[in-house]
Amino acid sequence: MKKAIIGSFLFTGVVFLAGCSDPVTPDERLEEYIKLWNDQEFDQMYSDYTSADTKETFTKEESADRMAALYSDLEVTDLVVTMPDVAEDTEWEEGEPATFTVPISFQTLAGPVEYEQDMTVVFEETEENENWFIQWEPALILPELEAGDRVRIVDTPGVRGEIFDRNGNPLAVNGSGYQVGAVSGELTDEAKNKLAEELSLSTETIDEQLAQDWVQAGQFVPLKKVSNSQRDKVADLSELDGITYQEIKMREYPYGEAASHLTGYISAISAEQLEEMGEEGYTANDQIGNRGLEQLLEDQLRAETGRNILIEKGGEKTVTVAEKPAEDGEDITLTIDAELQKTAFESMKGKQGTAAAVDPETGETLVLASSPGFDPGEWSLGISGERYTELSEDPDAPLLNRFSAAYAPGSTQKTITAAIGLEAGTLDPEEGYTINGLEWQEEGWGDFVVTRVHEAPNPIDLNKGLVFSDNIYFARVALEMGKETFIEGLENMGYGQELPFVYPMSDSQISNDGSIGSEGQLVDTSYGQGEMLTNILHLAVMYETVVNDGVMMKPLLFESEEQEVWKDGLLSPEHAEILRGDLREVVTEGFAGPADIPEVQIAGKTGTAELKQSGEESGKENGFFVAYDQEDPAFILAMMIEGVEDEGGSSYVSELAAEVFQNQ
């Protein structure tokens, strides 16, 4: 419709000229042209408005098509071509060219472009009509552009931000790795077989790469990129005939598997991610954070590519049309102690489990580990489908982030139950129950029975209840307390709430719906079974109430965060002192005996959560230990190991945790 109206108007203008009516003036003609320009109707601008002289000098491909192509390549938006003001009483000399200074502005991928350009409108007569036409020139596309000039976009990559621990140790940095390859004509069969074995390549793949058309004798043929963590392997391979390597830039993760679930990794952006995030400036050549902090902090870590739009003229002369400087990503410093993280990870011996450690005085998170881990560098380099299948089908589930999950906490919950009962006034630490046998139940419970592992000398008070981890004692404590008081106490401890922590964690829950529906469920919950679930960081944080006389600090992960109290008034100093004494005896006299080491006065509580299915007599057991140094509680460590039923239960976990205190 727009073109039809313009065409009609032009035809009318021709009639006016022929019939000596009011003629179309050059400014009116230019205004029509500028409207088409703002609408980017380049073909019509050329065919209907461009002068004959221009068409003799510039073909449609050199004018309209080039203008359209450059606007597309430069991602031109917000185009504004402004018609200059013309006085109403302006007199135009018949047949004489008219020149106008036209302001032009638009946005590009390299930033704004704004300039003024003189435009000349000439009167032309043909056999068919007579009218005013535009003298087009390349400078109307870009300032100072001339015929024969080349327009080029130059990218300057920014530097991705790096992640460091509290002591400046690198966790995710812009480092180097290796491109391992073979020298054509020099690779022996023995070396090829070793290369295939060490780099998870098939010998057929190596042969295919060496047989490419471009390969000539003596040339280096790249086969696989490997991370800096495999430098020893690379050095050994390079000793074999025909194998060599080149150092290349890549993202480096110096603590490898020990921090893999925390750091995550970067990798090539997927087609799905590009479709979702393309409007944010990502391209198919970019890498993007996946998993862990690399993904969580993508916006801060991501670098912005700098871009220049240049006009290259003859010789070495260039004109800068627009320039957007590169912006480096932000460096992030964590509260994590990377060496303590490594120690905790290695102490888990590659078993399925997780560990967290917090500084009770500040709330700073010192350890967030999940075992087993993976090599983040391997993913950053582009993992093969076969390798992905191997990792995803591994029964040890190395890709599962266990520190962000929630688990039944077992008997580590008894310390929390005791703290709630003490503060509620329903638990007298010196009052004991007479408990005989390994089983106990209230009248009317039917088949529900509470069992304990060991008998202990009566009466069973709080100290013995914790030292011997007596389920029957804590069942009676919970019943004395009642559901309402217990639920209120658990909620005060943070159950049923989102942990105020920057890293996404599964919420700790009292039960699936947050309530306790029966005495049996109340009893189970009192010692960390039933439907209760706790994430490992929250478990460590809750033990701050014992160390800090009732105060829980907000857990921190970034050095830039301010320290603040999350919850207080949870435990009086008198009651906290009682629990500290009892938790020390759990180690010196109870089930955490392997943690009774001479180097550190460890206090803590073990816990075993049995995960049996309905109808099963026994099932898989997760073992826990939450511990701190009684003399110098610089950190509280919570550790969980899966499948401890054949390892001696939670006592085994206390042994592993003790290694962390020994080797810190």
Image (spheres, rainbow, N blue to C red):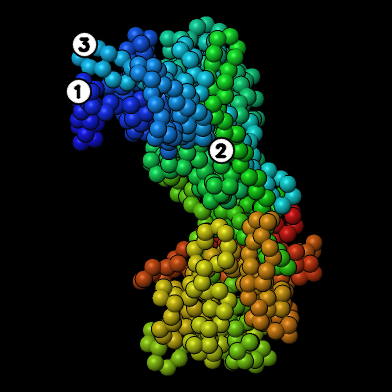
* Badge 3 vs badge 1, beta-carbon distance below 8 Å: no
Q: Is residue 384 above or below residue 460?
A: above
Q: Nearer the viewer, mark 3 or mark 1?
A: 1
The quarter in which the C terminus is drawn is: bottom right
Residue drawn at x 35%, y 16% is 95
Q: Nearer the viewer, residue 142 or 446?
A: 142
Q: Nearer the viewer, residue 384 or 35?
A: 35
The quarter in which the N terminus is drawn is: top left
Where residue 457 appears, x then y in whole percent? Answer: 64, 86
Question: Of the residues under marks 3 and 1, which one precedes in the sequence?
Answer: 1
Q: Is residue 546 above or below residue 85?
A: below
Residue drawn at x 63%, y 87% is 423
In the rendered view, does 577 fall on the left or right side of 287? right
In the rendered view, does 399 fall on the left or right side of 657? left
Q: Is residue 320 above or below residue 505?
A: above
Where residue 377 appears, x then y in whole percent? Answer: 56, 37
Q: Amino acid at mark 1?
A: Gly
Question: Of the residues under marks 2 and 1, which one precedes in the sequence?
Answer: 1
Q: Nearer the viewer, residue 23 or 456?
A: 23
Residue on which disc 2 sits: 304
Question: Of the residues under marks 3 and 2, which one precedes in the sequence?
Answer: 3
* Total marks in image: 3
Residue on which disc 3 sits: 127
Judged from the image, the secondary structure of the residue bearing numbered disc 1 is: loop
Furthest toward the top, the residue is 217
Q: Nearer the viewer, residue 522 or 590?
A: 522
- Residue 435 visible, this angle: yes
Q: Amino acid at mark 2?
A: Glu
Q: Nearer the viewer, mark 3 or mark 2?
A: 3
On residue 19, which mark appears?
A: 1
Where residue 649 appears, x then y in whole percent? Answer: 57, 65
